[in-house]
Image (cartoon, rainbow, N blue to C red):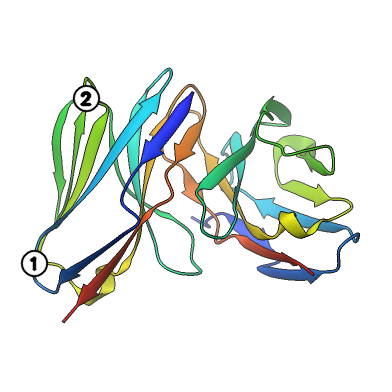
């Protein structure tokens, strides 16, 4: 089966660092996605982790621990435009299962 | 490269009517997926095409939903007859077989009244 858990909402200050956690239980696990979705727009790809460890891409980093079924998305130097929903999604065989998303609000 | 295009962007229909949603994937992407997000809940998988064949339709809620992908290019998702609980945002995504990247369309917001 598939089960993904992430916080519903988070608030952080402009310029700060925020970590969004995600735990998953996925049969046939192949990898873990993070997507960003602004209201009314398509989810856009941020990262895809297959192996354990941290992958850094500019201000965004994503971490995966397969043994713990755990991932996090780290956003540094937060900007107001980073206010959005962040979707954790696990990939099983040929299928991606999404969490409910974490709505991040960046405040001045 | 053009992205995934969905049409219409919004649709408001009465309960019992029929609606057809269309998705044009990125050219050359064999894999096409339909997802649905009901308000306040997660994006849920509906079905997966590989070219014109249904690879997995385990997420289709019931037989009022019919998806097709004739010729392996664009896909349609028909809801007939629509019910109130069908309201939500229907996303389409496509993926090339050679990589893992899913590209999503902007979605069709369906409201059944």
The percent coordinates of residue B45 (x first, y second) are 58, 39
User: Mark 2 — on which chain does it sit?
Assistant: A
Say whether residue A11 is left or right of residue B83. left
Position of the C terminus of chain B, as image quadrant, is: bottom right
Dividing the picture into quarters, in which one does residue B70 lie? top right
Say whether residue B106 is left or right of residue B61. left
User: Mark 1 — on which chain does it sit?
Assistant: A
Judged from the image, the secondary structure of the residue bearing numbered disc 1 is: loop
Q: Is residue A99 visible?
A: yes
**In the depicted view, which residue is nearer to us: A90 or A22?**
A22
Which residue corresponds to mark 2? Answer: A68
Judged from the image, the secondary structure of the residue bearing numbered disc 2 is: loop
Residue contact at pointers 1 and 2, CB within 8 angstroms? no
- In the depicted structure, whether residue B72 falls above or below residue B84: above
Of circles 1 and 2, the one toward us is: 2
- In the depicted structure, whether residue A108 falls above or below residue B14: below
Say whether residue B30 is left or right of residue A43. right
**Going from the N terminus, do you reach mark 1 or mark 2 first?**
1
**In the depicted view, which residue is nearer to us: A70 or A78?**
A70
Who's the residue at 89% across and 53% down the image?
A: B81
Who's the residue at 70% across and 60% down the image?
A: B87
Say whether residue A17 is left or right of residue B99. left
Q: Is residue B99 visible?
A: no
Give the spatial CA distance, label 1 vs label 2.
27 Å
The percent coordinates of residue B51 (x first, y second) are 67, 31
How many tags in the picture? 2
The percent coordinates of residue A28 (x first, y second) are 42, 17
Q: Residue furthest bottom?
A: A108
Which residue corresponds to mark 1? Answer: A16
Are the residues flagged by discs 1 and 2 from a single subunit?
yes
The percent coordinates of residue B62 (x first, y second) are 79, 38
Q: Residues within 10 Å of mark 2 (few under 14, many from 20)?
A: few
């Amino acid at each position: 089966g598939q089960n993904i858990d992430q916080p519903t909402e988070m608030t952080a200050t402009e310029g700060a660092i925020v970590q969004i956690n995600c735990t998953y239980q996925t049969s046939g696990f192949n990898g873990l996605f993070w997507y960003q979705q602004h209201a009314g727009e398509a989810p856009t790809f941020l990262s895809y982790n297959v192996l354990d460890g941290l992958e850094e891409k500019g201000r965004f980093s994503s971490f995966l621990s397969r043994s713990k079924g755990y991932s996090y998305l780290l956003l540094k130097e937060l900007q107001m435009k980073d206010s959005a929903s962040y979707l954790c999604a696990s990939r099983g065989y040929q299928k991606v299962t999404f969490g409910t998303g974490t709505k991040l609000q960046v405040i001045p | 490269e053009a992205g995934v295009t969905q049409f219409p962007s919004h649709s408001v229909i009465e309960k019992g009517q029929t609606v057809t949603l269309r998705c044009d994937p990125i050219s050359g992407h064999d894999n096409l997926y339909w997802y649905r997000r009901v308000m306040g809940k997660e994006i849920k998988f509906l079905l997966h095409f590989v070219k014109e064949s249904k690879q997995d339709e385990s997420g289709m809620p019931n037989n009022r939903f019919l998806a097709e992908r004739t010729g392996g290019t664009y896909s349609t998702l028909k809801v007939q007859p629509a019910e109130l609980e069908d309201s939500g945002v229907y996303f389409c995504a496509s993926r090339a077989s050679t990589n893992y990247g899913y590209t999503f369309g902007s979605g069709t917001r369906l409201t059944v009244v």
